[in-house]
Image: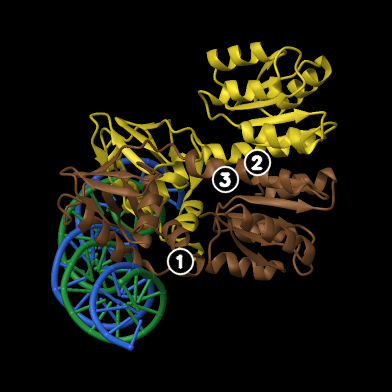
Chain colours: A brown, B yellow, C blue, D green
Amino acid sequence: MTRILVVDDEPQILRALRINLRARGYEVQVAETGAAALKTAASHPPDLVVLDLGLPDLDGVEVIRGLRGWTTVPIIVLSGRAGSEDKVSALDAGADDYVTKPFGVDELLARIRAVTRRLGGGAPVGPALRIGRHTVDLADRTVTRDDGAEVRLTPTQWAMLEKLLRNPGKLVSQRQLLQDVWGPEYQHETNYLRQYMAQLRRKLEDDPARPRHLITEPGMGYRYRP
Amino acid sequence: MTRILVVDDEPQILRALRINLRARGYEVQVAETGAAALKTAASHPPDLVVLDLGLPDLDGVEVIRGLRGWTTVPIIVLSGRAGSEDKVSALDAGADDYVTKPFGVDELLARIRAVTRRLGGGAPVGPALRIGRHTVDLADRTVTRDDGAEVRLTPTQWAMLEKLLRNPGKLVSQRQLLQDVWGPEYQHETNYLRQYMAQLRRKLEDDPARPRHLITEPGMGYRYRP
DNA sequence: CCGTTTCTTGACGTGGTTTTCACGCAGCCC
DNA sequence: GGGCTGCGTGAAAACCACGTCAAGAAACGG
């Protein structure tokens, strides 16, 4: 389920969005200040952020920067100001879209769909990802061994594997992995990586001691080699 | 270079966009009708489409569908109509953004940047850097020998090589290198440079004793010669 | 409520990376 | 020519990161 973090200090808007988004099947988190937004995003990384620029504590652009420091999660900005400079600075700070108040809920929902559409299918991942004698299907979250047996992965294992598989051939740094899977405060818990990488290799690699697809780049990170 | 296809039937807007986009370093193609747009996009696939909805021949949404049938290229819609339904239908048909006329050029440019930012990953370095019989890809962090074998580099070797490769042809002083790779307090440990430069040359140069690409500038620093 | 799975945390041996030291050599200035 | 400096190379030592095992805590499901 897609998790959306809504950041706004006006209770009515917060309420309206929460109801509407929940009704559409999204999981909704809310925050009323910039500081709370950053904290919530860190502990529970959302799949999308809807951010009002007019917050009481922090400047909206600061919140965008705070998020962009460690995540590429899509950000849709809401703002009462229609000025060109506001839009430009927010977009260049890392926002993905900018909606001027008053806005129609239908429009916001359509923009949310437009942004999230890129998320799932956007990555250039063919349905046939292979590791050793296994086929991984990211779309329906299944791993099938060539003899037909299913291999089960835990949520954390999936998150980690998915991050690697969506960047085939590319190096994924330890920090990126930790941030994406566990959140920014886990940046230095590299023992998690070793732990779960070992589990993945045990389940997927032909010879877990000599991995051919889930490669360690010492001191840097990991890489999925097709 | 990013190639943008601008689709609009008003000559002034077309002209204004072409000039502004060219000035920003984009490659610009234009089309005045929906049919021409589809044809041009097919023969010369663009990296981004700016599409006016009010075309004489086809409905704008039809153009979006025509493109989405075979490509996931980002589409930014321009429209004179601010109605909610128009926006929703365009976005749900596959548009990535929707800008209402009249719009500021600054805003459109910012939105173009926002959309393209997701695309390239932001690495402004061409992936085709060559040293001897090797190809270096900074984005993926891979070095491939021409016979297909992978060459592995340690983190320090990468840091040093990257610094040189990101300044092609330019002299990089010893101090700059030491500071970037090891930190400011290592400014005088020039033996590190000799050590690691030798390692890089052994791994990358055709004849490590007579380097052709990783050049020493005695007393000053090092240089990557393409 | 209990059993099972999953996540978190700690410890340890091993291998690779970094750091450090030593030596030979070429160019340069006095 | 002698002394000096800076560069390239080799090898040993110190250090760090990785993989692995193991066990406790937390979350989950019946």
Question: In the figure, is residue A167 to the left or right of A113?
Answer: left
Residue hosting label 2: B114
**B54 is higher (above) or lower (below) than A213:** above
> Could you tell me how many numbered marks the image carries?
3
Report the Cα–Cα distance between label 3 and label 1: 26 Å
Percent position of residue A103, x then y: 79, 48
Q: Residue at x 34, y 47 (%)?
A: B197
Percent position of residue A61, x then y: 72, 56
Query: First in sequence: mark 3 or mark 1?
Result: 3
**A138 is higher (above) or lower (below) than B44:** below
Q: Quadrant of the N terminus of chain B?
A: top right
User: Pointers 1 and 2 in contact (CB under 8 A)?
Assistant: no
Question: In the figure, is residue A121 to the left or right of B192?
Answer: right
Mark 2 — on which chain does it sit? B
Report the Cα–Cα distance between label 3 and label 2: 15 Å
Element assignment for label 2:
helix
Mark 1 — on which chain does it sit? A
Mark 3 — on which chain does it sit? A
Percent position of residue D22, x then y: 18, 79
**C16 is higher (above) or lower (below) than B83:** below
- Callout 2 amino acid: Ala
Q: Identify which residue, C12 or A165, lies in the foreground.
A: A165
Percent position of residue A138, x then y: 37, 45
Tell me the tag on residue A187: 1
Residue hosting label 3: A116
Other-residue count near label 2 (Cα within 10 Å), few / some / many at <14 / 14–19 / ≥20: many
